[in-house]
Image (spheres, rainbow, N blue to C red):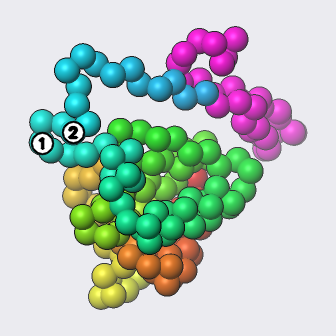
Amino acid sequence: AVKQMGRNIELIRFKQFGEDLVLLELLTAVSAKAQPVRGDTATTSGGQKTIADAFEEASTELKGLYADLEAYLLGLNDDVTQKELRYYYAFKRIKNFACVEIKPSLGLLRVYVKEDPVRGFDETEGLVRDVTGVGHYGTGNVELTLRSHEDLEATKYLIETSYLAS
């Protein structure tokens, strides 16, 4: 029935162990595809491209970087799910812990994670930026800019921290 309803539905089973522990188990997750509205185009009035268009325009290297990032995020645990939204991909357990934008014109990926910006990470390398109070799509207050596999390796600890906190 969940698969036939055509709505975004997640079926979660919970079990209580004692008074302090609760197990949440994702049984099924169904994402309904958005139906195109008549007159809707691939870009919005502001010229913003959808995530599907951005992926199609990306270079082979950028697609490879995204594939490695996606494999890493989904490989964190069996409870991680991915959802394609209009402008970004969201990765979540119970809540979103990472949101990914593809920027083909800049040749990079932007990953937003939930992290404590006061923690003291080094913003001088251009990989990490505090975006608290800055408008952006997706969840998170820290922006990771990935241009290469080395950038991904250097920022995995922040992604994992966000995953563990979700």
Residue situated in front as seen by the camera: 36 or 70? 36
| Residue 140: image location, x then y, percent | 40, 56
Q: Amino acid under label 2? A: Thr
Query: Does the magenta segment cover residue 22?
Result: yes
Query: Would residue 51 be seen by someone viewing this image from the given angle?
Result: no
- The part of the image, by quadrant, that contains residue 1 is top right
- The part of the image, by quadrant, that contains residue 102 is bottom left
Please give the range of residues in magenta. 1-29
Residue 42 vertical position relative to residue 40 in the rendered view, above or below = below
Q: Amino acid under label 1? A: Gly
Q: CA distance from mark 2 to mark 1?
A: 8 Å
| Residue 4: image location, x then y, percent | 63, 13
Q: Which mark is residue 125?
A: none
**Residue appearing at x 48%, y 56% in the figure:** 98
Residue at disc 2, secondary structure? loop
Residue situated in front as seen by the camera: 15 or 46? 46
Residue at disc 1, secondary structure? loop
List the residue tagged with mark 1. 46
User: Label 1 neighbourhood size at 10 Å, few (<14), some (14-19), many (20+)?
Assistant: few
Q: From the viewer's perspective, is the residue at label 2 or at label 1 nearer?
A: 2
Residue 70 vertical position relative to residue 25 in the rendered view, above or below = below
In the visual, does 122 lie left or right of 46? right
Outermost right residue: 18
Query: Does the magenta segment cover residue 41?
Result: no
List the residue tagged with mark 2. 43
Query: Would residue 3 be seen by someone viewing this image from the given angle?
Result: yes
Callout 2 touching callout 1 (CB < 8 Å):
yes
> For the stretch drawn in magenta, what is the main secondary structure?
strand
Residue situated in front as seen by the camera: 62 or 115? 62
In the visual, does 154 lie left or right of 100? right
